Image: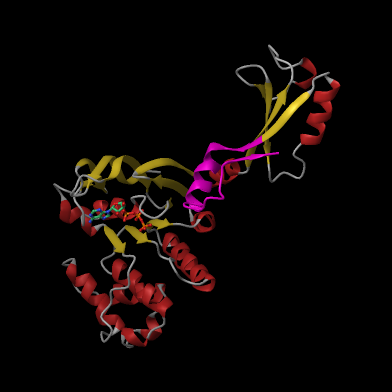
Amino acid sequence: MSNIVEITNLKKSYKGGFEALKGVSLNIREGEILALLGPNGAGKTTLISTVCGITTATSGSVTVGGHDILSDYRAARSMIGLVPQEINLEPFEKVINSVRFSRGLFGKPSDDAAIEHVLRQLSLWDKKDNQIRELSGGMKRRVLIAKALAHDPRVLFLDEPTAGVDVELRKDMWDVVANLKADGVTIILTTHYIEEAEAIADRVGVIAKGELMLVEDKDTLMARMGQKELEVQLTQTLSEVPESLRSDTLRLSDDGTALIYTYDTRAERTGITKLLANVAKAGLTLRDLVTRQSSLEEIFVNLVHEGDETSGAEDAA
Ligand SMILES: Nc1ncnc2c1ncn2[C@@H]1O[C@H](COP(=O)(O)OP(=O)(O)OP(=O)(O)O)[C@@H](O)[C@H]1O
């Protein structure tokens, strides 16, 4: 799959010196749905704004469809649709006129068939002659998407499309995103919700404190998130894992005083009971047991429970 957006070592410092992006590199593949997950203030909006040319980077480069966003701004920008976080619509405007206007902003010739396609795609065709103030909150969000799609962009950025919306509307939005993907649009959305990334993304990127911590296929990521480590601390010091205990999922700690067992928390059987029985059979005695989530899970836990003092990546067994 080819890359439609290439972001290389992007840095952004705001006035006063605050570094909101600390060298982000990311390739976005044509046709994928990429979820950028991160807590408030992580730099998600700054990243999107920079790619869309609303904010200027301090250094680094971005190309969209091979066009540099600085030296070839118009070509790059015309390939992008941006759906902002806030609903900023003109209440007395008719839906169809609002969408037509957005197309005109990009210098595209008026094209009723294209506007109809977009409105139908977002189930807004019936509402085309309504004033925006007459629409529900969910429909207003869809008008924002229609406006962002009015000039036939190939890449759509959705900045927190479901922030503050109820569960039903959130699912509705996920369906909209899936339909757009089926139509060939590449979609990048930001979110605070792991469930949202899990529900719709092909790949997930995690942003925290201006850094891209990881980007991975969703399925791989979700499989890894279920991994946990059990540290079986021993009263003895070993030089190697005893023969009777050897397996792919068991290793010796660096100092030889613990056996570290990796298991899947979602598996029907974790194998812990058997492991502990075998440890005893091998003549080893336990000092303590500690479980640890995978480093990825730590990142997620920190993200989700940011500011929540009861959270922790480690828990004693
Ligand atoms: N115009 C600005 N001037 C100075 N600092 C800014 C500006 N815009 C954003 N920041 C700071 O940059 C950091 C990243 O902000 P950004 O809006 O990109 O985060 P975010 O991940 O989108 O957060 P949220 O999920 O709350 O939207 C924050 O600390 C924010 O205060």
Q: Is residue 14 left or right of residue 206?
A: left
Of residues 121 and 287, which is closer to you in this image?
287
Give, as a single range, the part of the protein colored magenta: 291-317
54 in the magenta segment? no
Q: In the image, is residue 295 part of the stretch drawn in magenta?
A: yes
Query: Is the residue 149 above or below the residue 279 in the image?
Result: below
Front residue of this view, candidates 128 and 313: 313
| Front residue of 85 and 256 | 256
Whether residue 66 is visible here, answered yes or no, is no
Hey, which residue is sitting farthest left in the picture? 71
Residue sitting at x 60%, y 18%: 254
> Residue most toward the right?
281
Which quadrant is the N terminus positioned in? top left
Q: Quadrant of residue 100?
A: bottom left
- Looking at the figure, which quarter contains the C terminus? top right
Residue 295 lies, with reference to residue 90, above or below; the image says above
* Residue ID at (18%, 66%): 106
Counting from the top left corner in percent of width and height, residue 38 is at: 42, 51
21 left or right of 202 in image? left
Residue appearing at x 33%, y 77% in the figure: 116
Displayed-image quarter of ligand 1 = bottom left
Kindly indicate the quadrant of the structure image that contains residue 154. Answer: bottom left
Whole-percent x and y of residue 18?
Answer: 25, 46
Q: Can residue 79 be seen at all in this image of the molecule?
A: yes
